[in-house]
Image (cartoon, rainbow, N blue to C red):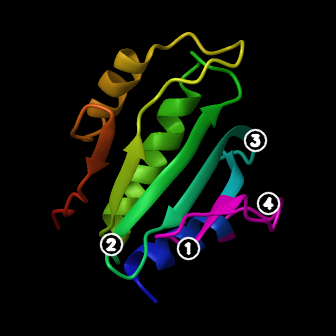
């Protein structure tokens, strides 16, 4: 089992109320696992969909979806910080295609979304990645 698969399995196992389904399969990846993200008080605050990359990139985790139920309240920041901290723990690279999707609540543009990801250590412009950060003892 790759580090990326361990990371995705860990994330997916954290939430008892998750729907044990996959939403699709990428030709180069494992199944895409969606789940509701809960804060530390077990309050659902957003949605995430992750996939471990295939055998050729055993440390890459693709983020297919992140959304906060209440945009502009810091919930997205909570979610991405948790994903990044966990990625550091598992030594995996997070990969995402930054594109703002407007669903009625979304006010962020794609360039603003790219800037938002930059705040968390992602590099790139639309196809973005974040290398794991080694923890100092």
Q: Marks 1 and 4, how far apart in space?
A: 18 Å
- SS class of the residue under badge 3? loop
The tag on residue 100 is: none
The tag on residue 30 is: 1
Residue hosting label 2: 59
**Number of residue marks:** 4
Q: Residue 25, relative to residue 79: is it above or below? A: below
Which label's residue is closer to the chain start, 1 or 4? 4
- SS class of the residue under badge 4? loop
Q: Position of residue 93 (x, y in %)?
A: 31, 61
Residue 39 visible somewhere in the drawing: no
Which label's residue is closer to the chain start, 3 or 4? 4
Q: Marks 3 and 4, how far apart in space?
A: 13 Å
Which label's residue is closer to the chain start, 3 or 1? 1
Of residues 6 and 63, the one nearer the viewer is: 63
Residue hosting label 4: 18
- SS class of the residue under badge 1? loop
Callout in the foreground (1, 4): 1
Q: Residues within 10 Å of mark 4 (few under 14, many from 20)?
A: some
**At x 54% / y 48%, what residue is drawn?**
64
Callout in the foreground (3, 2): 2
Residue hosting label 3: 43
């Amino acid at each position: 089992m790759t580090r990326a698969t361990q990371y995705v399995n860990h994330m997916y196992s954290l939430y008892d109320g998750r729907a044990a389904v996959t939403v699709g399969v990428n030709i180069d990846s494992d199944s895409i696992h969606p789940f509701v993200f809960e804060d530390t008080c077990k309050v659902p605050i957003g949605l995430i969909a992750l996939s471990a990359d295939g055998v050729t990139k055993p440390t890459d985790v693709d983020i297919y979806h992140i959304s906060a139920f209440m945009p502009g309240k810091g919930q997205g920041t909570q979610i991405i910080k948790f994903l990044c901290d966990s990625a550091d723990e598992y030594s995996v690279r997070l990969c995402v295609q930054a594109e703002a999707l407007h669903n009625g609540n979304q006010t962020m543009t794609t360039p603003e979304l790219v800037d938002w990801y930059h705040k968390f250590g992602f590099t790139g412009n639309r196809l973005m990645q974040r290398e794991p950060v080694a923890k100092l003892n």
